[in-house]
Amino acid sequence: MPGDKEIIGKYVPDAALDLVYDTLIRHKFKLHISRKRATKLGDFRAGTKGNPHRISLNHDLNPYHFLVVFVHEFAHLVVFEQYGRRVQPHGIEWKTAFRTLMQPYFEREVFPPDLRQALENYLINAKAINGSDVPLTKALANYDLKQASGTDLEKLAEGTQFRTTGGRVFKKLDKQRKRYKCLCMSTGRLYLFNPLAKVHPLSATD
């Protein structure tokens, strides 16, 4: 997989292909393209017992999103090789590595202007790429080939009931820091939802 430039080219922007491929060749880690995972977009696993490091990325990300997650996870690899497990996963060492590794892609003008601006703002204090940075998530979603159906949860009024893609019905409550507290109508349990979660609002007759 890492040696097949043509396959890699299916997942990243054309202007980024040479840089990504060079990274794969020089660092000799295993890149795995994963099925869609609800809880994460990618991950890094350190090599053990002579096995190489491994980075996995979800297959359904648009090229810009795939690239951002790739650089995010590669920054974890770089930090691990330098510090081992002695530093925090998203501490200053990782933030610095992420910004440094993203710079060549900025220099090649890989990203459209709106996405580059969102990325630069995000990199000031980068964290996990899990949807918590709303401006970046929105900017990346603009380049999805297939737009997800439904309405952004943040657009619903408090107290609105909605159905998720999984079929469960919730009521939107107040906001807790960056996520919305929602009540599951069938169990009475509370859950935290990303503001950009795609949901289907219910009318009074549903």
Image: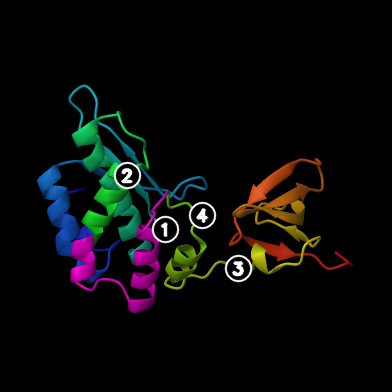
- Indicate the position of residue 31 as horizontal and vertical percent values: 26, 45
- Would you call the spot at circle 4 few (<14 residues within 10 Å), some (14-19), or many (20 or more)? some
Which residue is outermost to the top?
49
Q: Nearer the viewer, mark 2 or mark 1?
A: 2
Q: In the rendered image of this protein, does residue 97 appear above or below residue 64?
A: above
Decide: marks 2, 1 in contact (CB < 8 A)?
A: no
Left-right relation of 194 to 41: right
Principal secondary structure, stretch drawn in magenta: helix
**Residue 107 in view here:** yes
Residue with the mark numbered 1: 60
Dot 2 falls on a residue whose secondary structure is: helix
Give whichever of discs 3 and 2 has the lower sequence position.
Answer: 2
Query: Mark 1 belongs to which amino acid?
Result: Asp
Q: Nearer the viewer, mark 4 or mark 2?
A: 2
Which residue is outermost to the left?
26
Region rendered in magenta: 103-127
Give whichever of discs 4 and 1 has the lower sequence position.
Answer: 1
Give whichever of discs 3 and 1 has the lower sequence position.
Answer: 1
Decide: marks 3, 2 in contact (CB < 8 A)?
A: no
- Would you call the spot at circle 2 few (<14 residues within 10 Å), some (14-19), or many (20 or more)? few
**Residue 3 in view here:** no
Dot 3 falls on a residue whose secondary structure is: loop
Query: Mark 3 belongs to which amino acid?
Result: Ser
- Specify the label residue 132 is tagged with: 4
Residue with the mark numbered 2: 92
Q: Residue at left 36%, top 59%?
A: 124
Q: CA distance from mark 3 to mark 4?
A: 20 Å
* Nearer-the-camera pick, 22 or 36: 22
